[in-house]
Image: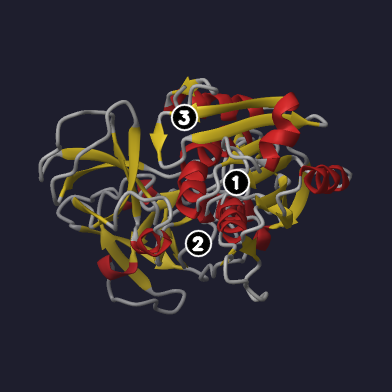
Amino acid sequence: MSRHAQHPVRSVDEHRRAVTEALRGIRPRGETVPLREALGRVLAEDLVAPLSLQPFENSQMDGFAVRAADTRRAPGEQDARLVIVAPVPAGHVPGPLAAGEAAPVMTGAPLPPGADAVVPVEETLPGGFPAPGTVLRVPADQPAGRFVRRAGEDLLEGTTALSAGQRLTPARIGLAAALGCAALRVRARPRAVVYTTGDEVVAPGAERGPAQIFDANAAILAAQLTEAGVEVLAAHLVPDDAGAFAARLAADAARGPDLFVSSGGVSEGAYEVVRQVLGPHGEFVHVAMQPGGPQGLALRDGVPFVCLPGNPVSTLVSFEMFLRPALTETVGAPVPRPLRTARLAEAVRPLPGRTQVRRGVWDGAVVRMAGGPGSHLLAAAARANALVLLPPGDAELPAGAPVELLALD
């Protein structure tokens, strides 16, 4: 019997869809946060504009507010002559502009009633902003609407300014502020509990035995989940003891997480505690991918449980290939990985029947492999800024061949 004969085999796309479907049961809660805390969050409800932008007609630049009809060219004249009246500073309400008058206006200042154009100060004579009563010369035939910001030209009161499900970028937060919003209703971050398994791992900072290694997986998963907008409630190191894991899981379920994530304990060894405890509650499969072949999905007390393999690079790659895109699609988690195309700096041989995910250093055009394909090569993965996706194949891919990659930073 082959090593993987006990498990069904899935393609990468099939397992990504399965993880996404498993996460659809997460029901995002809502919470209100001040604007300074809203960056990267996902809007929970539509933001309907409580006012128009612009809220009033105002000047696009420093100059003179005029009535365009007063600037019509007189026979033999190149300029129109108007009488300067009191200036209109930004933030002040102006009086009406009578025929033949010009009011100095600053950028953003309201247009006086009756004015319908602004002449930039540098186009006028005698230059600058002379005292009221001075005769101002402006180029004739000014068009109505010149350098005027119309009320509502950006956004009309009562229309949808931002839609539920949109990620809040600096520009969107700025729009909310311009509409007078001091806080926004956003989706609460999903809450996750993380497990790493094995008698062979100890927490960083603890005393390490001669046959033990420090646990990198809890740190990897906590960082990836946090980056993806998930709140990590707890991260536990679980020994190779099914009873201890079951007890730990029961205690954590009482905390009301939205998601469980584990690394390790999903293969076919004698001490695969995750598979032993969760086997009746889900499925364990082999995905046609290297690294990260063994994968599991379960539902425990109505909460999705995503089970990842235990080698550090397998954990890292599996999260990027399956869990991050699922979080992005189901709960709008931030920082999706853009798919890019690059050319190989060197020849690479893919794997027959399996997608190989190599770590690479990408300069925007060419990608070079960072270390070998082994799932234990964490230092090489730390040098990488991309995951290179090599489709299944028997033939070597030559240097210069195009490949797809996920940009990591």
Where 150 sits versus 370, above or below? above
Q: Is residue 158 left or right of residue 349?
A: right
Q: Quadrant of residue 49?
A: top right
Residue 91 visible in the displayed image: yes
- In the rendered structure, find residue 239 and report the number of the disc placed on it: none
Residue pointed to by mark 3: 3
Distance from Cα at disc 2 to Cα at disc 3: 72 Å
Question: Of marks 1 and 3, which one's residue comes earlier in the chain?
Answer: 3
Q: Where is residue 230? Give x, y as percent.
A: 66, 49
Distance from Cα at disc 2 to Cα at disc 1: 60 Å
Question: Tag 2: Cα neighbours inside 10 Å, few (<14), some, or many (≥20)?
Answer: many
Q: Amino acid at mark 1?
A: Gly
Q: Where is residue 398? Give x, y as percent.
A: 10, 41
- Residue in view at x 58 percent, y 30 percent: 19
- Residue in view at x 45 percent, y 52 percent: 313
Nearest to the observer: residue 324 or residue 106? 324
Residue pointed to by mark 1: 264
Question: Of marks 2 and 1, which one's residue comes earlier in the chain?
Answer: 2
- In the rendered structure, find residue 108 and report the number of the disc placed on it: 2
The reply to whether the C-beta atoms of the residues labelled 2 and 3 are less than 8 Å apart is no
Q: Amino acid at mark 2?
A: Gly
